[in-house]
Image: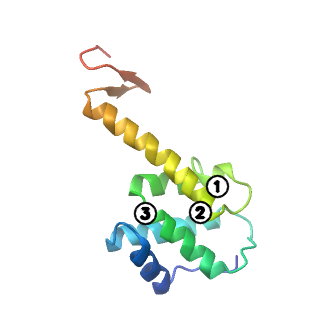
Amino acid sequence: MENLKVSQMLQDECRSKSLSSEPNHLSLAAKRTAMMFGCYRKGEANDPEVYTMAIAATLAEYPAEVVEYVTDPRTGMPAKCKFLPTVAELREECERHFEWVRKRDDLIAQGWRLVNGRWVKPGEAA
């Protein structure tokens, strides 16, 4: 995609579609969209501006932790997809990681601890 830039229109579109209208979260979604696209060779989206808005609007629906994970070149879509992901593929990846985050948070709320990559039961020694 040629010089994909996150415009005010993109942020306005994200704001209208996102669950969180906080400017910092929308800015994060827009920046991470641009970073993720930078990890791919030139793409072939039919309409690059619409595609960019759709990806950013989708990311804006998720917490920052999920957005950062799925756009990170080490852990997210750039590490898993050879070509630009579709909006559906991105949403699936976001949902997959969001579910992991929810399960992790539930375990922590129940007193479990993550020690050296291993879950430790409440009251059990690490």
Mark 3 Cα within 10 Å, few/some/many (few <14, many 20+)? many
Q: Secondary structure at mark 3?
A: loop
Residue topped by disc 2: 36
**Distance between the alpha carbons at the discs numbered 3 and 1:** 19 Å
Mark 2 Cα within 10 Å, few/some/many (few <14, many 20+)? many
**Residue at 28 percent of width and 14 percent of height:** 124
Whether the residues at callouts 2 and 1 have beta carbons within 8 Å, the answer is yes
Q: Is residue 41 above or below residue 113?
A: below
| Residue 17, picture quadrant | bottom left
**Distance between the alpha carbons at the discs numbered 2 and 1:** 7 Å
Drawn side of residue 39 relative to residue 124, left or right: right
Whether the residues at callouts 3 and 1 have beta carbons within 8 Å, the answer is no
85 or 17: nearer the viewer? 17
**Residue at 33 percent of width and 39 percent of height:** 105
**Distance between the alpha carbons at the discs numbered 2 and 3:** 17 Å
Q: Earlier in the sequence, mark 2 or mark 3?
A: 2
Q: Position of residue 45 (x, y in %)?
A: 71, 74
Q: Tally the marks.
A: 3
Disc number for residue 61? 3
Mark 1 Cα within 10 Å, few/some/many (few <14, many 20+)? many
Q: Position of residue 113 (x, y in %)?
A: 32, 27
Amino acid identity at mark 1: Pro
